[in-house]
Image (cartoon, rainbow, N blue to C red):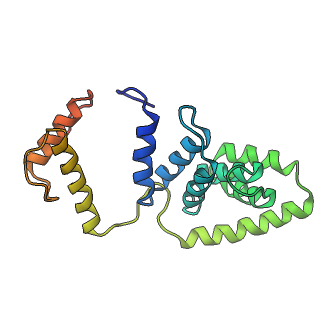
Amino acid sequence: KGIGLAVDTDEAVRWYRRAAEQNFATAQTNLGILLAFGTDIRRDYVAAARWFRAAALTGDPVAQANLGLLLANGQGIKRDPVEAHAWLILAAEGDANGAAYRDRLANQLDEREIAAAARRASVLRKEIKTRTPRPGRAQPRPTADFRRIELTAQRDLKTLGLYAGAVDGIVGGGTRAAVRAFQRRPGLPATRR
């Protein structure tokens, strides 16, 4: 949205991708939305379908609705109206748009297809219940992964000339000061985080 900054879709994609790769369902959904429907970037329906499926399998109704739309239209994934309807049945349980899309697609299906979609939705519902994480929550990661992120942040801050300490993955006063200095550069409020 560019709140406090100029809109930079490429940068948004980069950050959403980093979070999506760490299994953060909301980031997976947002990345899929940008890739499928973004206006400032080259659309990539294949990647969007992959990210929507990953988030949909955590129970994210927005991802389920968008995956259903891609399946219904054959965008980035083989057209499969029954599978699309199954995902839209699930999406409708938590997303008003999902319900509208489900009803619209149902008008194009016969009774046999609707019944098959309902059975498939039941199977998917059970699969989703056995999976983690839940929507919007990243899976716990080993401490080494957090340290790698901190190392990357320190390295990037050093490259920008904001951090003079050792790149060791240990967040201390120097790292915090560099983060606050970085936040002030684009006009973001400096925090203690």
The reply, left or right, for residue 21 in relation to residue 50 is left
Q: Quadrant of residue 3?
A: top left
Query: Total of numbered circles in the picture?
Result: 0
From where the camera sits, is residue 192 visible? no
| x and y, in percent, of residue 63 in the image | 59, 52
Picture residue at 67% right of the left edge, 44% below the top? 96
Picture residue at 78% right of the left edge, 64% below the top? 118
| x and y, in percent, of residue 123 in the image | 70, 71
Picture residue at 80% right of the left edge, 60% below the top? 82
The reply, left or right, for residue 161 in relation to residue 146 is left
State whether residue 189 is above or below residue 20.
above
Picture residue at 62% right of the left edge, 53% below the top? 46
State whether residue 176 is above or below residue 50.
above
The reply, left or right, for residue 163 in relation to residue 101 is left
From where the camera sits, is residue 136 visible? yes
Quarter holding the C terminus is: top left
State whether residue 40 is above or below residue 85.
above
